[in-house]
Image: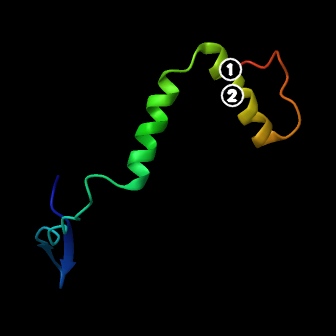
Amino acid sequence: MPALRRKVGGAVKKRGPASPKKKLDYPEETAGSRMAREIRVRANKLTKEERDELFKRAMQVYYGGSWPKEAARR
C-alpha cells in the first residue's frame, strides 16, 4: 500500500507510517464466551423438528402473533 502524501509548500512530502497500534489485552475466556460455547453445544444436539419449533417461537417473539405454516425459512 503506498504511503500517504501531503502537499507542503508546493512540494509533495511523503508521510511515514502511522504510529503502531497498541496491542489490546483480551482475556482468553469470559462468562459470555463460556455461555456461547454451551449454547452452541446444546443447539448442535437439536433435531430438525426441535429447530423448526424453536424457529417458530422466535418468529413469534420478533413479529408477534402466530407464524404462518407455509412460510419459507431458507
Report, in whole angstroms, how far the alpha carbon at label 2 lies from the one at label 1. Answer: 5 Å
The label on residue 21 is: none
The answer to whether residue 74 shows anywhere in this view is no
Residue 4 lies, in percent from the top left, at 20, 65
- Left or right: where 6 falls relative to 41: left
Q: Which residue is mark 1?
A: 52
Kind of residue sitting beneath label 1: Asp
Residue 15 lies, in percent from the top left, at 13, 72
Q: Which residue is mark 2?
A: 55
Q: Are marks 2 and 1 in contact (CB under 8 Å)?
A: yes
Residue found 40% across the figure and 39% down from its top: 37
Where 61 sits versus 53, above or below? below
- Left or right: where 13 falls relative to 24: left
Which residue extends farthest bottom? 9
Residue found 68% across the figure and 28% down from its top: 54
Residue found 17% across the figure and 52% down from its top: 1
Residue found 61% across the figure and 14% down from its top: 48
Which residue extends farthest right? 65
Quadrant into which the C terminus falls: top right
Instruction: State the image quarter where residue 46 is shown.
Output: top right
Residue 16 lies, in percent from the top left, at 10, 70
Kind of residue sitting beneath label 2: Phe
- Left or right: where 61 falls relative to 13: right
Could you classify mark 2 by the number of other residues whose Cα lies within 10 Å: few (under 14), some (14-19), or many (20 or more)? some
The answer to whether residue 40 shows anywhere in this view is yes
Q: Secondary structure at mark 1?
A: helix
